[in-house]
């Protein structure tokens, strides 16, 4: 329940760099669970995989003249690339995960 305690002083930059426990967890402290931290490295791996697979699929659809599939997978690749860039930005900024 310490994570839900109200703080009266502002957090320091060092606290943000270490990571805030239960920062985005609505069930923080429920059932004695350990504090959750961000999984940025996992998101980098998953976004990279999504970019590679969707670009590969878009190339296969384009080769077979199925332009609707090329457009759909191209949009998915573009969205995954934007997500990948944002997560890498957060990781380089110093957030743990």
Image (cartoon, grey):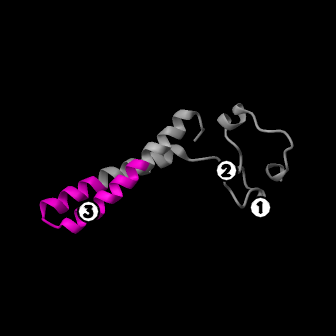
Disc 3 to disc 1, C-alpha distance: 46 Å
Q: Position of residue 55 (x, y in %)?
A: 27, 53
Identify the residue shown where x is 13% and y is 59%: 63
Neighbourhood count class around disc 3 (C-alpha, 10 Å): few under 14, some 14–19, many 20 upward? some
Q: Do the residues labelled 1 and 2 touch (CB within 8 Å)?
A: no
- Asked whether 81 or 44 is in front, the reply is 81
Q: Residue 31 carries which label?
A: 1
The answer to which image quadrant residue 12 occupies is top right
N-terminal-most mark, 3 or 1: 1
Q: Image height check: is 85 above or below 59?
A: above
Q: Magenta stretch: dominant SS?
A: helix
Q: Image height check: is 57 above or below 2?
A: below
Q: Where is residue 80 in the image (x, y as percent from the top left)?
A: 39, 52
**Mark 3 or mark 1, whichever is nearer to me:** 3
The answer to which image quadrant residue 95 occupies is top right
N-terminal-most mark, 2 or 3: 2
Q: Do the residues labelled 2 and 3 touch (CB within 8 Å)?
A: no
Q: Position of residue 77 (x, y in %)?
A: 33, 54
Quickly name the residue at label 3: 71
Quickly name the residue at label 2: 36
- Asked whether 75 or 57 is in front, the reply is 75
Q: Magenta part of the protein: which range?
A: 54-82
């Amino acid at each position: 329940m310490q994570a839900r305690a109200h703080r009266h002083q502002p957090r320091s930059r060092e606290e943000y760099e270490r990571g805030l426990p239960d920062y985005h967890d609505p069930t923080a402290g429920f059932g004695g669970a350990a504090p959750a931290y961000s999984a940025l490295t996992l998101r980098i791996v998953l976004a990279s995989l999504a970019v590679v697979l969707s670009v590969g699929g878009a190339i296969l659809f384009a080769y077979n003249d199925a332009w609707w599939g090329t457009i759909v997978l191209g949009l998915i690749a573009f969205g995954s690339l934007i997500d990948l860039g944002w997560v890498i930005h957060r990781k380089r900024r110093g957030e743990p995960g």
